[in-house]
Image (cartoon, grey):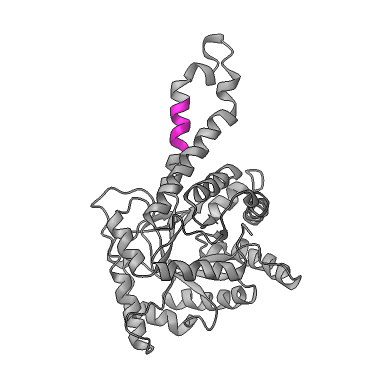
Amino acid sequence: MPIATPEVYNEMLDRAKAGKFAYPAINVTSSQTLHAALRGFAEAESDGIIQISTGGAEFLGGQHSKDMVTGAVALAEFAHIVAKKYDITVALHTDHCPKDKLDGYVRPLLAVSEERVKAGQNPLFQSHMWDGSAETLADNLSIAQELLERARAARIILEVEITPTGGEEDGVSHEINDSLYTTVDDAVRTVEALGLGEKGRYLLAASFGNVHGVYKPGNVVLRPDLLKELNEGVAVKYGKPAGSQPFDFVFHGGSGSTAEEIATALENGVVKMNIDTDTQYHFTRPVVDHMFRNYDGVLKVDGEVGSKKTYDPRTWGKLAEAGMAARVVEACGHLRSSGTKIN
């Protein structure tokens, strides 16, 4: 069972919450980056999450049509086949989807899984993300209610982002400023709209200074301790025991975070951490090294013929896979998921 069933995905998240660890959620854009992520999880003996953004799905759909649904479905079906060769369990997830792309991405993918469930099968994806951070909170949560109802019926978990994450992700951008911090009032309004599990399970991407992309130390002020305040505020409001953690948090913009920041986030209920920028770099870096070292082999310089073995995509592709897989192993260590696989 390499691709998690809905029941196993819930178990994965419950185990992470109880064990104070989180699953790396690795963005993939090809069969090769998918294998790199699977390989990294297997080498770390960690289960994990594979995710496809709207831009990644468009790329997977091919530059002729750039169809996001085709790209996402194709790679998901491919993952269901090849993941069987890896001794770990992974969940398939779709990353950031803003309002203007819902009808071209998440809603059609929900329909695919609805048909599968009606036929007695498991959903194609185990979770989908609705990124309403560019909308008012009222509009964001109204759309989230609709999506959560459909997701629950299709045995899928919904991820919601209720307040902005800084930087840019697939064309959605937010300034780096004081609005990057979710308030207790924001959290309470989320529960009023989406409940605490009785309306369907959801993951919450709250903002505690997170920024997508690349940033240098000192440019971003992360406050993972804020997640404790959000949990405590909601626990008090809804009569939950002291110390309880009502939310399953997602850490966005995790690339470049310190070990201390990650540890604090894990203690405060983070069960999923998105990693894209770092894995992109570790996929590309070995390729660049290969090209520089073998300049006269990958190019036909001065009328020569070059070296087929050198420019063969398999040669440098293997290096790219290994580089990215190593970064996934490192992420599992940082998030304490190493050695925690279910099987």
| Residue at 48% over, 43% down | 325
Question: Residue 287 in magenta?
Answer: yes
Residue in the foreground of this view, choosing between 199 and 343: 343
Quadrant housing the C terminus:
bottom right
Q: Is residue 188 above or below residue 79?
A: below
Secondary structure character of the magenta stretch overall = helix
Judge from the rendering whether residue 77 lies leftward or rightward of residue 248; answer left or right: right
| Residue at 42% over, 62% down | 22
Residue in the foreground of this view, choosing between 279 and 3: 3
The reply to whether residue 114 is in sight is yes
Task: Farthest residue to the bottom: give it.
Answer: 239
Quadrant housing the N terminus:
bottom right
Question: Residue 318 in magenta?
Answer: no
Residue in the foreground of this view, choosing between 287 and 243: 243
Image-quadrant location for residue 175: bottom left
The reply to whether residue 209 is in sight is no
- State the image coordinates of residue 34 (x, y, percent, origin top left): 57, 47
Image-quadrant location for residue 2: bottom right
What is the magenta range?
A: 284-290
Judge from the rendering whether residue 172 lies leftward or rightward of residue 126; answer left or right: left
- State the image coordinates of residue 73 (x, y, percent, origin top left): 66, 56
Residue in the foreground of this view, choosing between 25 and 96: 25
Task: Farthest residue to the top: give it.
Answer: 303
- State the image coordinates of residue 291 (x, y, percent, origin top left): 47, 25
